Image (cartoon, coloured by chain):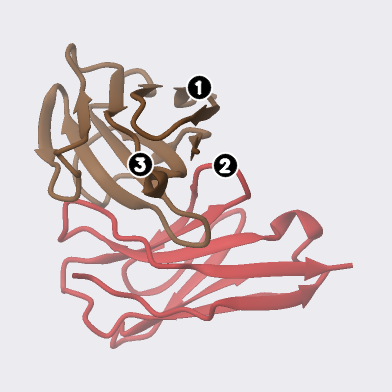
Amino acid sequence: LAKTTQPISMDSYEGQEVNITCSHNNIATNDYITWYQQFPSQGPRFIIQGYKTKVTNEVASLFIPADRKSSTLSLPRVSLSDTAVYYCLFSGSARQLTFGSGTQLTVLP
Amino acid sequence: EAEVAQSPRYKITEKSQAVAFWCDPISGHATLYWYRQILGQGPELLVQFQDESVVDDSQLPKDRFSAERLKGVDSTLKIQPAELGDSAMYLCASSFGRGGLDTQYFGPGTRLTVL
């Protein structure tokens, strides 16, 4: 079963850049790395997906080293509204997504 | 922007009672998923439909849980009888295609409390 390891929690201050790292030692060749965000009492929301190197969209960047055994989600200049749980997971070779426990990011004023 | 609809948003029931949750996916999405999320944990897939067919229900407790998507559009998840350990958030999601690469769009969930 695809397994990821993330920090349980992180704190940051408004305006700072936040980097959340995820390790995935058993990622398969066909797997992409996907990040979801979840606010309390809401369903998860897709943030970004990548295979290797760097991917950037309007809300985040995703850095994936050459060995693909880890990935880093980068959130530029976070605000209070970025306080949420962030999940790193595989997608591609498996038909289903397997969520871990995620990282609780708390942004402080 | 199209959204996944779920109802009810909250449900309180007593153990041994039957409960049912409804989900209406985004129009045109072929794949529908039901997840269960226990407080403090990530979502756990219960069942996945491709159109009206079940493609994965390996984690569905079939002695008490059932799910259907009769016309390949909306779906119902039922629990009978409910147990205390079923208290959780039940999330529905849909995607345009099948497989993990497709972005899943989640509904707001149904919060179930079993007393």
Q: Amino acid at mark 3?
A: Glu
Q: Residue at x 22, y 27 (%)?
A: B30
Give the residue type that dot 1 points to. Answer: Pro
Q: Which secondary structure, mark 3?
A: loop
Instruction: Identify the mark at residue B96; answer none if there is no mark.
Output: none
Q: Position of residue A33 (x, y in %)?
A: 34, 66
Look at the picture and state if A97 lies above or below B50: below
Is there any visible trace of residue B24 in the rendered image?
no
Chain letter of disc 3 in the image: B
Question: At 24% from the left edge and 51% from the top edge, which residue is drawn?
Answer: B100
| Chain on which label 2 sits | A
Q: Is residue B5 left or right of residue A95?
A: right
Category of crowding for the residue at label 3, using alpha-carbon neighbours closer than 10 angstroms: few (below 14), some (14–19), many (at least 20): some
Give the labeled residue for mark 2: A42
Q: Is residue B89 above or below residue A101?
A: above
- Hey, which quadrant is residue B80 in on the image? top left
Q: Amino acid at mark 2?
A: Gln
| SS of the residue under disc 1 | loop
User: According to the rendering, which colour does chain A have?
Assistant: red
**Residue at coordinates 16% horizontally, 66% vertically from top-left?**
A30
| Drawn side of residue B94 relative to residue B62, left or right | right
| Residue of label 3 | B83
Residue where numbered disc 1 is placed: B8
Q: CA distance from mark 3 to mark 1?
A: 19 Å
Q: Is residue B109 above or below residue B52?
A: below
Both marks 2 and 1 on one chain: no
Q: Which chain is brown?
A: B
